[in-house]
Image (tube, rainbow, N blue to C red):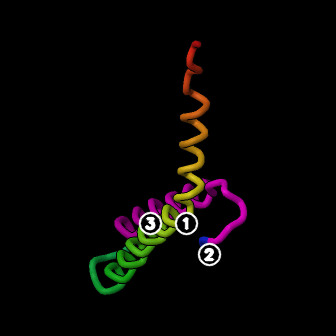
Amino acid sequence: MTCDRADRNARWWLLYALSLLLVGLFGAVEVFVPTGGLRGILQVVVMTGFGLMALWVKCNRVAMELEQTRRRQHSAKPASG
């Protein structure tokens, strides 16, 4: 995943998909995998997913800032003069 994009809109679907995948994987590991080496490896995989979420935030920080700026400008009341 590269952070250099001409498109300055955050790709929220990617974050949502990753979140859903991590929650599902975490639940499956807790329910179906017995304590042992495999469980530890799968838990590391899930934690790596959270690192990917941090990377998503880093790559989309400009788009999120632009979105916040647009919201502030839209909600700002014009000064009466």
Q: Quadrant of the N terminus?
A: bottom right
Asked if marks 1 and 2 touch (Cβ < 8 Å), the reply is yes
Judging by the rendered image, the residue that carries numbered circle 1 is 59
Residue under circle 3? 54
| Magenta residues (range) | 4-32
Q: Residue at x 55, y 66 (%)?
A: 59
Q: Which residue is mark 2?
A: 2
Please give the label number shown on residue 15. Answer: none
Residue 61 lies, in percent from the top left, at 52, 58
Q: Percent x, y for residue 64? A: 55, 51
Mark 3 surroundings: few (<14), some (14-19) or many (≥20) residues within 10 A: few
Q: Amino acid at mark 3?
A: Ala
* Of residues 73 and 46, the one drawn nearer to the viewer in this rendering: 73
Q: Nearer the viewer, residue 60 or 51?
A: 60
User: Which residue shows up at 61% across the image and 39% down it?
Assistant: 70
* Image depth: mark 3 or mark 1 in front: 1
Give the mark nearer the N terminus: 3 vs 1. 3
For residue 50, what is the image quadrant? bottom left
Q: Image quadrant for the C terminus?
A: top right
Left or right of residue 41, residue 49 in this image:
right
Of callouts 2 and 3, which one flags the residue occurring earlier in the amino acid sequence?
A: 2
Q: Amino acid at mark 1?
A: Cys
